Image (cartoon, helix red, strand yellow):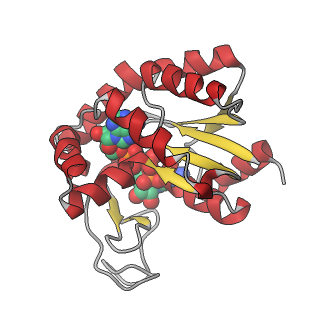
Amino acid sequence: MKRVVLLGPPGVGKGTQAGFISEKYNMLHISTGDIFRANIKEGTPLGKTAKEYMEKGLLVPDELVCDLVEDRLTWDDCKDGYLLDGFPRTVFQAEHFDAWLKSRGEELSVVLDIQADNEALIFRATGRRVCPACGKPYHIAVMPPAKEGICDYCGAKLIQRADDAEETVRKRLQVYQDQTSPLIEYYTGTGKIAEVDGMKTPEEVFEQICALLGE
Ligand code: AP5
Protein backbone atom coordinates (compact mmCIF):
# COMPACT_ATOMS: atom_id res chain seq x y z
CA MET A 1 0.00 0.00 0.00
CA LYS A 2 1.48 3.30 -1.08
CA ARG A 3 0.79 6.96 -0.39
CA VAL A 4 2.67 8.90 -3.03
CA VAL A 5 3.03 12.64 -3.68
CA LEU A 6 3.97 14.00 -7.11
CA LEU A 7 5.84 17.27 -6.70
CA GLY A 8 7.09 19.51 -9.48
CA PRO A 9 6.53 22.74 -11.41
CA PRO A 10 3.62 23.44 -13.77
CA GLY A 11 3.87 21.45 -17.00
CA VAL A 12 6.61 19.08 -15.82
CA GLY A 13 4.45 16.03 -16.50
CA LYS A 14 2.81 15.23 -13.15
CA GLY A 15 -0.58 14.52 -14.74
CA THR A 16 1.00 12.47 -17.55
CA GLN A 17 3.02 10.34 -15.12
CA ALA A 18 0.04 10.04 -12.75
CA GLY A 19 -1.89 8.42 -15.60
CA PHE A 20 0.90 5.88 -16.21
CA ILE A 21 1.39 5.18 -12.48
CA SER A 22 -2.27 4.74 -11.65
CA GLU A 23 -2.65 2.31 -14.54
CA LYS A 24 0.41 0.18 -13.76
CA TYR A 25 0.11 0.21 -9.96
CA ASN A 26 -3.69 0.44 -9.82
CA MET A 27 -3.44 3.53 -7.63
CA LEU A 28 -6.13 6.12 -7.10
CA HIS A 29 -5.07 9.42 -8.73
CA ILE A 30 -6.21 12.55 -6.89
CA SER A 31 -5.42 15.85 -8.64
CA THR A 32 -6.40 19.05 -6.85
CA GLY A 33 -6.26 20.93 -10.18
CA ASP A 34 -8.75 18.43 -11.69
CA ILE A 35 -11.05 18.75 -8.65
CA PHE A 36 -11.06 22.54 -9.01
CA ARG A 37 -11.61 22.40 -12.79
CA ALA A 38 -14.56 19.99 -12.32
CA ASN A 39 -16.07 22.40 -9.77
CA ILE A 40 -15.56 25.36 -12.11
CA LYS A 41 -17.32 23.44 -14.88
CA GLU A 42 -20.25 22.63 -12.58
CA GLY A 43 -20.41 26.22 -11.28
CA THR A 44 -20.23 25.21 -7.60
CA PRO A 45 -19.33 27.77 -4.87
CA LEU A 46 -15.90 26.05 -4.57
CA GLY A 47 -15.44 26.38 -8.33
CA LYS A 48 -16.32 30.09 -8.24
CA THR A 49 -13.72 30.74 -5.52
CA ALA A 50 -11.03 28.59 -7.19
CA LYS A 51 -11.56 30.25 -10.58
CA GLU A 52 -10.68 33.69 -9.21
CA TYR A 53 -7.22 32.41 -8.25
CA MET A 54 -6.55 29.90 -11.03
CA GLU A 55 -7.20 32.27 -13.92
CA LYS A 56 -4.56 34.61 -12.47
CA GLY A 57 -2.06 31.76 -12.04
CA LEU A 58 -2.27 32.04 -8.24
CA LEU A 59 -2.72 29.33 -5.63
CA VAL A 60 -6.11 28.66 -4.06
CA PRO A 61 -6.02 29.52 -0.30
CA ASP A 62 -4.31 26.91 1.88
CA GLU A 63 -7.10 26.18 4.39
CA LEU A 64 -9.62 25.58 1.63
CA VAL A 65 -7.29 23.14 -0.17
CA CYS A 66 -6.31 21.25 3.01
CA ASP A 67 -9.94 20.77 4.09
CA LEU A 68 -10.88 19.62 0.62
CA VAL A 69 -8.05 17.08 0.24
CA GLU A 70 -8.11 15.74 3.78
CA ASP A 71 -11.86 15.19 3.50
CA ARG A 72 -11.42 13.43 0.15
CA LEU A 73 -8.79 11.11 1.65
CA THR A 74 -11.27 9.79 4.22
CA TRP A 75 -13.38 8.25 1.44
CA ASP A 76 -13.41 4.48 1.30
CA ASP A 77 -11.58 4.33 -2.05
CA CYS A 78 -8.44 5.81 -0.41
CA LYS A 79 -7.94 3.11 2.18
CA ASP A 80 -5.54 1.15 -0.06
CA GLY A 81 -3.38 4.19 -0.83
CA TYR A 82 -3.36 7.06 -3.31
CA LEU A 83 -1.32 9.22 -5.63
CA LEU A 84 -1.53 12.95 -4.91
CA ASP A 85 -0.92 15.24 -7.90
CA GLY A 86 -0.64 18.95 -7.03
CA PHE A 87 -0.95 18.66 -3.24
CA PRO A 88 0.72 19.72 -1.00
CA ARG A 89 1.89 22.86 -2.72
CA THR A 90 3.03 25.11 0.12
CA VAL A 91 4.91 24.46 3.35
CA PHE A 92 1.68 25.29 5.21
CA GLN A 93 -0.17 22.54 3.29
CA ALA A 94 2.66 20.03 3.86
CA GLU A 95 2.77 20.69 7.60
CA HIS A 96 -1.02 20.56 7.89
CA PHE A 97 -1.10 17.32 5.90
CA ASP A 98 1.70 15.72 7.93
CA ALA A 99 -0.16 16.53 11.18
CA TRP A 100 -3.34 15.07 9.68
CA LEU A 101 -1.55 11.87 8.61
CA LYS A 102 0.08 11.56 12.02
CA SER A 103 -3.28 11.92 13.78
CA ARG A 104 -4.38 8.84 11.80
CA GLY A 105 -1.18 6.87 12.45
CA GLU A 106 -0.26 7.09 8.75
CA GLU A 107 2.70 8.37 6.74
CA LEU A 108 3.70 9.08 3.16
CA SER A 109 5.63 6.40 1.25
CA VAL A 110 7.52 8.74 -1.07
CA VAL A 111 7.52 12.22 -2.60
CA LEU A 112 8.55 12.07 -6.28
CA ASP A 113 10.15 15.39 -7.20
CA ILE A 114 10.06 15.79 -11.01
CA GLN A 115 12.15 18.64 -12.41
CA ALA A 116 12.74 20.20 -15.83
CA ASP A 117 14.07 23.56 -16.98
CA ASN A 118 11.82 26.59 -17.44
CA GLU A 119 12.08 26.69 -21.23
CA ALA A 120 10.84 23.09 -21.46
CA LEU A 121 8.03 23.83 -18.98
CA ILE A 122 6.76 26.78 -21.02
CA PHE A 123 6.94 24.74 -24.25
CA ARG A 124 5.04 21.87 -22.63
CA ALA A 125 2.32 23.91 -20.92
CA THR A 126 1.59 26.22 -23.87
CA GLY A 127 1.46 23.22 -26.26
CA ARG A 128 -0.77 21.16 -24.01
CA ARG A 129 -4.27 20.22 -25.06
CA VAL A 130 -6.65 18.28 -22.84
CA CYS A 131 -9.76 16.23 -23.32
CA PRO A 132 -12.66 17.96 -21.53
CA ALA A 133 -14.53 14.63 -21.30
CA CYS A 134 -11.96 12.10 -19.99
CA GLY A 135 -9.13 14.44 -18.91
CA LYS A 136 -6.40 12.81 -21.02
CA PRO A 137 -3.52 15.27 -21.66
CA TYR A 138 -1.83 15.68 -25.06
CA HIS A 139 0.87 17.92 -26.51
CA ILE A 140 0.54 19.30 -30.03
CA ALA A 141 4.19 18.39 -30.83
CA VAL A 142 5.32 15.76 -28.32
CA MET A 143 2.22 13.66 -27.65
CA PRO A 144 -0.28 14.55 -30.39
CA PRO A 145 -3.56 12.67 -30.76
CA ALA A 146 -3.91 10.35 -33.79
CA LYS A 147 -6.46 12.76 -35.31
CA GLU A 148 -5.70 16.46 -34.83
CA GLY A 149 -7.78 18.08 -32.11
CA ILE A 150 -9.67 14.89 -31.20
CA CYS A 151 -9.23 12.67 -28.13
CA ASP A 152 -7.95 9.17 -29.02
CA TYR A 153 -9.95 7.60 -26.21
CA CYS A 154 -13.39 9.22 -26.26
CA GLY A 155 -13.56 11.24 -29.49
CA ALA A 156 -14.22 14.58 -27.74
CA LYS A 157 -12.81 17.84 -29.14
CA LEU A 158 -9.60 18.80 -27.31
CA ILE A 159 -9.34 22.16 -25.56
CA GLN A 160 -6.57 24.41 -24.25
CA ARG A 161 -6.65 25.16 -20.52
CA ALA A 162 -7.40 28.81 -19.69
CA ASP A 163 -4.28 29.00 -17.49
CA ASP A 164 -1.98 27.70 -20.27
CA ALA A 165 -1.68 31.09 -21.97
CA GLU A 166 2.04 31.97 -21.95
CA GLU A 167 1.72 34.94 -19.59
CA THR A 168 -0.24 32.89 -17.05
CA VAL A 169 2.23 29.99 -17.34
CA ARG A 170 5.08 32.39 -16.49
CA LYS A 171 3.13 33.63 -13.46
CA ARG A 172 2.49 30.02 -12.34
CA LEU A 173 6.22 29.27 -12.63
CA GLN A 174 7.00 32.28 -10.44
CA VAL A 175 4.40 31.14 -7.89
CA TYR A 176 5.95 27.65 -7.97
CA GLN A 177 9.41 29.11 -7.33
CA ASP A 178 8.22 31.27 -4.44
CA GLN A 179 5.67 29.04 -2.72
CA THR A 180 6.12 25.40 -3.79
CA SER A 181 9.86 24.87 -4.33
CA PRO A 182 10.58 25.28 -0.56
CA LEU A 183 8.83 21.91 -0.23
CA ILE A 184 11.93 20.24 -1.68
CA GLU A 185 13.90 21.25 1.39
CA TYR A 186 10.95 20.41 3.65
CA TYR A 187 10.68 16.85 2.34
CA THR A 188 14.44 16.39 2.16
CA GLY A 189 14.29 16.91 5.91
CA THR A 190 11.81 14.03 6.25
CA GLY A 191 13.96 11.70 4.12
CA LYS A 192 10.96 10.94 1.88
CA ILE A 193 12.00 12.68 -1.32
CA ALA A 194 13.22 11.01 -4.51
CA GLU A 195 14.45 12.97 -7.54
CA VAL A 196 13.16 12.28 -11.04
CA ASP A 197 14.70 13.82 -14.18
CA GLY A 198 11.71 15.28 -16.03
CA MET A 199 13.78 16.37 -19.06
CA LYS A 200 13.62 12.84 -20.54
CA THR A 201 10.81 11.48 -22.71
CA PRO A 202 7.55 10.57 -20.91
CA GLU A 203 8.46 6.86 -21.19
CA GLU A 204 11.96 7.41 -19.76
CA VAL A 205 10.56 9.49 -16.91
CA PHE A 206 8.16 6.65 -16.14
CA GLU A 207 11.03 4.13 -16.11
CA GLN A 208 12.77 6.18 -13.42
CA ILE A 209 9.55 6.27 -11.39
CA CYS A 210 9.02 2.51 -11.70
CA ALA A 211 12.58 1.93 -10.46
CA LEU A 212 11.74 4.04 -7.39
CA LEU A 213 8.32 2.52 -6.71
CA GLY A 214 9.41 -1.06 -7.31
CA GLU A 215 7.08 -3.80 -8.54
P1 AP5 B 1 -2.71 21.84 -11.62
O1 AP5 B 1 -3.77 21.36 -12.48
O2 AP5 B 1 -2.17 20.96 -10.55
O3 AP5 B 1 -1.55 22.39 -12.54
P2 AP5 B 1 0.04 22.41 -12.40
O4 AP5 B 1 0.67 21.90 -11.16
O5 AP5 B 1 0.38 23.81 -12.74
O6 AP5 B 1 0.49 21.34 -13.36
P3 AP5 B 1 0.02 21.15 -14.79
O7 AP5 B 1 -1.30 20.44 -14.81
O8 AP5 B 1 0.10 22.44 -15.55
O9 AP5 B 1 1.18 20.25 -15.39
P4 AP5 B 1 1.59 18.75 -15.14
O10 AP5 B 1 2.84 18.73 -14.33
O11 AP5 B 1 0.44 17.92 -14.66
O12 AP5 B 1 1.97 18.38 -16.63
P5 AP5 B 1 1.24 17.47 -17.73
O13 AP5 B 1 1.41 16.04 -17.40
O14 AP5 B 1 -0.16 17.96 -17.99
O15 AP5 B 1 -3.15 23.18 -10.87
C1 AP5 B 1 -3.80 24.21 -11.58
C2 AP5 B 1 -4.15 25.34 -10.61
O16 AP5 B 1 -5.03 24.84 -9.57
C3 AP5 B 1 -2.97 25.96 -9.83
O17 AP5 B 1 -2.32 26.95 -10.59
C4 AP5 B 1 -3.70 26.52 -8.60
O18 AP5 B 1 -4.36 27.72 -8.90
C5 AP5 B 1 -4.76 25.47 -8.31
N1 AP5 B 1 -4.25 24.44 -7.37
C6 AP5 B 1 -4.10 23.11 -7.62
N2 AP5 B 1 -3.62 22.48 -6.53
C7 AP5 B 1 -3.47 23.43 -5.57
C8 AP5 B 1 -3.00 23.42 -4.22
N3 AP5 B 1 -2.58 22.27 -3.64
N4 AP5 B 1 -2.96 24.57 -3.55
C9 AP5 B 1 -3.40 25.74 -4.08
N5 AP5 B 1 -3.86 25.83 -5.36
C10 AP5 B 1 -3.89 24.69 -6.10
O19 AP5 B 1 2.18 17.79 -18.98
C11 AP5 B 1 2.22 19.09 -19.55
C12 AP5 B 1 2.39 18.97 -21.08
O20 AP5 B 1 3.68 18.43 -21.36
C13 AP5 B 1 1.38 18.03 -21.74
O21 AP5 B 1 1.04 18.58 -22.97
C14 AP5 B 1 2.15 16.70 -21.91
O22 AP5 B 1 1.70 15.99 -23.05
C15 AP5 B 1 3.59 17.18 -22.09
N6 AP5 B 1 4.59 16.31 -21.47
C16 AP5 B 1 4.45 15.58 -20.33
N7 AP5 B 1 5.60 14.92 -20.06
C17 AP5 B 1 6.48 15.27 -21.03
C18 AP5 B 1 7.85 14.91 -21.29
N8 AP5 B 1 8.53 14.09 -20.49
N9 AP5 B 1 8.45 15.45 -22.38
C19 AP5 B 1 7.77 16.30 -23.20
N10 AP5 B 1 6.48 16.65 -23.02
C20 AP5 B 1 5.83 16.16 -21.94
Residue 105, percent across and down? Answer: 71, 29
Residue 122 visible in rendering: no
The C terminus lies in quadrant: bottom right
Front-lying residue, 5 or 166 = 5
Residue 16 visible in rendering: yes
In the image, is residue 149 above or below residue 170? below
Q: Residue furthest right?
A: 215
- The residue positioned 68% from the left and 33% from the top of the image is 108
- The residue positioned 71% from the left and 53% from the top of the image is 80
Residue 62 placement: quadrant: top left
- The residue positioned 66% from the left and 32% from the top of the image is 104
- Residue 130 falls left or right of residue 164: right
Residue 107, percent across and down? Answer: 69, 31
Residue 4, percent across and down? Answer: 64, 42
Front-lying residue, 91 or 66 = 66
- The residue positioned 77% from the left and 46% from the top of the image is 213
Front-lying residue, 106 or 38 = 106
Residue 140 placement: quadrant: bottom left
